[in-house]
């Protein structure tokens, strides 16, 4: 399954130290211009979706609704996560490609 590959690549990015996660860290990554892609769990709250959609549109950073909190967190070796940023350009593009193929 392609979706599993996307989560595996997210794990690679996490091991490289390129995946701030959680609302505060992702917000900081977006504001500092480091984020290259933001993933939001499909089961995240409406407020979280609205907030990050607006921030990403303003900063011109791609945002994808993907997977769920449990799987996003597990992919990066953490507990539940609604939001994850990828700060590496190549990994962000690769994850986007894998998600669009699924």
Image (tube, rainbow, N blue to C red):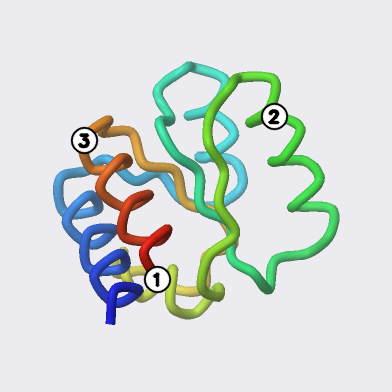
Q: Residue at x 59, y 41 (%)?
A: 24
> Is the Cβ of the residue at disc 3 closer than 8 Å to that at disc 1?
no
Residue occupied by mark 2: 55
Residue 53 in which image quadrant? top right
Residue occupied by mark 1: 102
**36 relative to 50, above or below:** above
**36 relative to 66, above or below:** above
Q: Residue at x 36, y 75 (%)?
A: 74
> Is the Cβ of the residue at disc 2 closer than 8 Å to that at disc 1?
no
Give the total number of marks visible in the rendering.
Answer: 3
In this view, the residue in front, 73 or 94, is 94
Residue occupied by mark 3: 90
Q: Secondary structure at mark 1?
A: loop
Callout in the foreground (3, 1): 1
Q: CA distance from mark 3 to mark 2?
A: 22 Å
Residue 44 in which image quadrant? bottom right
């Amino acid at each position: 399954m392609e979706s599993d590959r996307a989560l595996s690549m997210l794990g690679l990015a996490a091991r490289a130290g390129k995946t701030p996660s959680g609302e505060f860290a992702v917000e900081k990554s977006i504001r500092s211009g480091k984020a290259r892609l933001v993933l939001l769990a499909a089961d995240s709250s409406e407020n979280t979706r609205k907030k990050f959609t607006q921030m990403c549109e303003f900063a011109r950073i791609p945002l994808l609704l993907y997977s769920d909190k449990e799987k996003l967190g597990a992919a990066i070796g953490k507990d539940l996560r609604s939001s994850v940023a990828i700060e590496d350009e190549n990994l962000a593009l690769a994850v986007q490609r894998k998600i669009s193929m699924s």
